[in-house]
């Protein structure tokens, strides 16, 4: 959907920071709202959406269980 949003889960990313999550949330909200920067009368809703998406993203990343790929046999 938005090519500038990077995968933030292991093993694709390590040491994911709050700034990484906030940047992804901002890109998502920009994409779905169609605003790069909202007008003053929409700023509160825009900022609340970024915060909500960031919080949901943090919760998701903290809840994921990443399993190691199955070992291949040498046969």
Image (cartoon, rainbow, N blue to C red):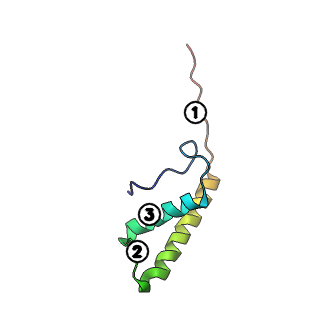
Question: Please, what secondary structure does the residue beneath circle 1 have?
Answer: loop
- State the residue lying farthest toward the bottom: 41
**Hey, which quadrant is residue 66 in on the image?**
top right
What residue lies at 40% left-to-right and 78% top-to-bottom?
A: 38
Q: Which residue is mark 3?
A: 27
Numbered circle sitting on residue 31: none
Question: Please, what secondary structure does the residue beneath circle 3 have?
Answer: helix
Q: Quadrant of the C terminus?
A: top right
Nearest the viewer among 41 and 68 is 41
Which mark sits nearer the N-terminus, 3 or 1? 3
Q: Which residue is mark 1?
A: 69
Q: Position of residue 8 (x, y in %)?
A: 54, 51
Distance from disc 3 to disc 1, alpha carbons, whole Å, reads 30 Å
Check disc 3: other Cα within 10 Å, few if <14, some if 14-19, many if 20+. some
> Up-down: is 30 above or below 5?
below
Nearest the viewer among 6 and 65 is 6
What residue lies at 50% left-to-right and 50% top-to-bottom?
A: 7
**62 with respect to 33 (left or right):** right
Mark 3 near mark 1, Cβ–Cβ under 8 Å?
A: no
Which mark sits nearer the N-terminus, 2 or 3? 3
Q: Which residue is mark 2?
A: 37
**Nearer to us: label 2 or label 1:** 2
């Amino acid at each position: 959907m938005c090519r500038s949003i990077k995968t933030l889960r292991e093993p694709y990313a390590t040491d994911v920071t709050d700034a990484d999550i906030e940047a992804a949330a901002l890109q998502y909200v920009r994409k779905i709202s169609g605003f790069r920067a909202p007008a003053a009368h929409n700023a509160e809703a825009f900022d609340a959406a970024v915060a909500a998406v960031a919080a949901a993203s943090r919760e998701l990343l903290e809840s994921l269980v990443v399993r190691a790929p199955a070992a291949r046999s040498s046969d």
